[in-house]
Image (cartoon, coloured by chain):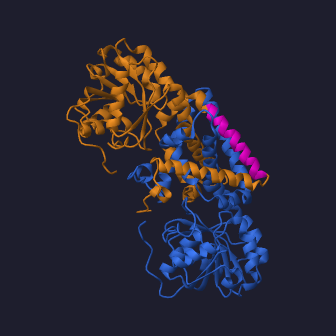
Chain colours: A orange, B blue
Amino acid sequence: MPERLGPPLETPLFERVALIGLGLIGSSIARAARHLNLARTLVAIDQDEAVIGRVKELKLTDEATTDFAAGAEGADLIILCVPVGACGAVAEAIKGSLKPGCIVSDVGSVKGSVIAQVQPHLPPGVSFVPAHPVAGTEYSGPDAGFSTLFFNRWCILTPPEGTEDAAIDRVRDFWSAMGSNVEVMTAQHHDLVLAITSHVPHLIAYNIVGTAADLETVTQSEVIKFSAGGFRDFTRIAASDPTMWRDVFLHNKEAVLEMLGRLNEDIALLARAIRWGEGDKLFELFTRTRAIRRGIISEGQETPEPDFGRRRDGQ
Amino acid sequence: MPERLGPPLETPLFERVALIGLGLIGSSIARAARHLNLARTLVAIDQDEAVIGRVKELKLTDEATTDFAAGAEGADLIILCVPVGACGAVAEAIKGSLKPGCIVSDVGSVKGSVIAQVQPHLPPGVSFVPAHPVAGTEYSGPDAGFSTLFFNRWCILTPPEGTEDAAIDRVRDFWSAMGSNVEVMTAQHHDLVLAITSHVPHLIAYNIVGTAADLETVTQSEVIKFSAGGFRDFTRIAASDPTMWRDVFLHNKEAVLEMLGRLNEDIALLARAIRWGEGDKLFELFTRTRAIRRGIISEGQETPEPDFGRRRDGQ
């Protein structure tokens, strides 16, 4: 992965930044923040001893602990990098340690539910600026992270009404420093947008891979062999972290079911066009969808190389 | 794309090979066959003057013509590389030129329909060995091809009952020389296997991209911006050639509708699990699907690199 982060800041943006959960996202923030000198002191907090051990081996942070209350003590920025369903419990575990003026943030793929879980635990004088970096890979854990993960990716902030502008700006600066483009929207709109650009695609990918595995007329070995016909593209996101994604669907239920309903209507129309041999309808759709891909490429969110530029070495 | 084809053969496998249709697949065969010396004379046939002009500029073949009958004359191997729906018309156009002992083949993604279209036109003494190289990219046309497209990809042969073994072996040798692993199965089984590993994934990808483009609550610009959350993976195959794919669905109707029905049943179950908060069911599926991806990677049909090893330069 080419390194294109800027030089380290002369003065850190924050004195003490605590990251809770050192998986793919948390450990990528740690690497980027350390590289860019975004925090004078960087603290890793994780409930898993093995993860904390690995964080120490990799020297990702200045401090590393399984003690949530102690790790959060005195931090001026705390970022929850845990599965969406765990945010409420984490907020409860740290609420006694939050110093006045502290900013709490997160990286969850669902925002409405996280706000509902976290905000009741926060004392006055603490700001909550929920964030969602739209970036990731299909790998998990502290070894999977890398410092450029957020480079030229969007990070969406969904501050609840009444959040102080200064706190929003500081979180924006933090993500901008890591190379992200920052956008602000409501949590409700975020959850709808991500339902179609991320949650439903993952659900469909998990689903098609599951369906293929269950067929009695086609063996699993055949599915694997002949996957280069298109199927393998779906398996990448269907290999993503199961806990994270279970929580996403449970916590963005309404938007996901709404988008899935739309999708089903459209599939029914397509199936009908196939059944009745309506080639023109198929051709029209297949032409229209090319334009979207061109848009994604020209906006710098995708490589124009054939086949994603997949390396063929060793294949 | 690294070059890993073997050295050119000392003696060509065929005297005169005619490729009909010089798109991604036809032009990749031309490049590989030329590089490997698989044909003493390589002939390009295409109805499109512009394509033939380009083939000449790129010097892909020894001869290039828009005259189907003349181009096919005297060939000992003729490969139809046209959309599945055009195979019958092409067979009719060349039937008067087929010399005794000639082998006709194709590269279509559907086999039952191609056999039904082509076989009635072939005179006795001509063998038909349908083939399907399971390889491709989202790009089309004579400039999109490359000689290693088929390297370490599967090529499926579906010879109708009674096809001479010698003809099957010669086609097998042709594909093996280009680096493909060759497998033989019935046309019917092929069409079922490919429905799930290729056709339905394409249909779903076209569909989800179309649904996203039509939403009134989320703008197209938002879909494009936040596509790195998973959506962009689907847009690659939804950018594939519309004519080719229209024909695939029209000509593999039964298997596609059958597999789509399975998929819909499974989506309904998933939607129900989400609605009722059945996290265990989701978690179980999301864990199971990871194994399939590992199988595809260990079989050499996919790169293990995060994010397909997408190049991030310029993003």
Is residue A168 depicted above or below B282 in this figure?
above
Q: Could you tell me residue A270's position as x and y percent?
A: 71, 47
Question: As drawn, is B172 to the left or to the right of A303?
Answer: right
Residue A270 is inside the magenta segment: yes
- Residues B22 and B156: in front is B22
Residue B102: image quadrant is bottom right
Kindly identify the residue that appears in the image at 49 percent across and 37 percent down. Answer: A242
Residue A98: image quadrant is top left
Q: Could you tell me residue B20's position as x and y percent?
A: 64, 75
Q: Could you tell me residue B315's position as x and y percent?
A: 41, 49
- Look at the image and tell me whether residue B177 can be seen: no
- Look at the image and tell me whether residue A223 can be seen: yes
Question: As drawn, is B27 to the left or to the right of B75?
Answer: left
Question: As drawn, is B264 to the left or to the right of A157?
Answer: right
Q: Could you tell me residue A9's position as x and y percent?
A: 23, 36
Is residue A126 depicted above or below A282 in this figure?
above
Residue A127 is inside the magenta segment: no
Kindly identify the residue that appears in the image at 26 percent across and 33 percent down. Answer: A38
Residue A229: image quadrant is bottom right
Q: Which residues are magenta?
A: A257-275
In terms of secondary structure, what is the magenta stretch mainly? helix
Question: As drawn, is A162 to the left or to the right of A170?
Answer: right
Is residue A142 depicted above or below B197 in this figure?
above
The residue lying furthest to the top in this view is A124
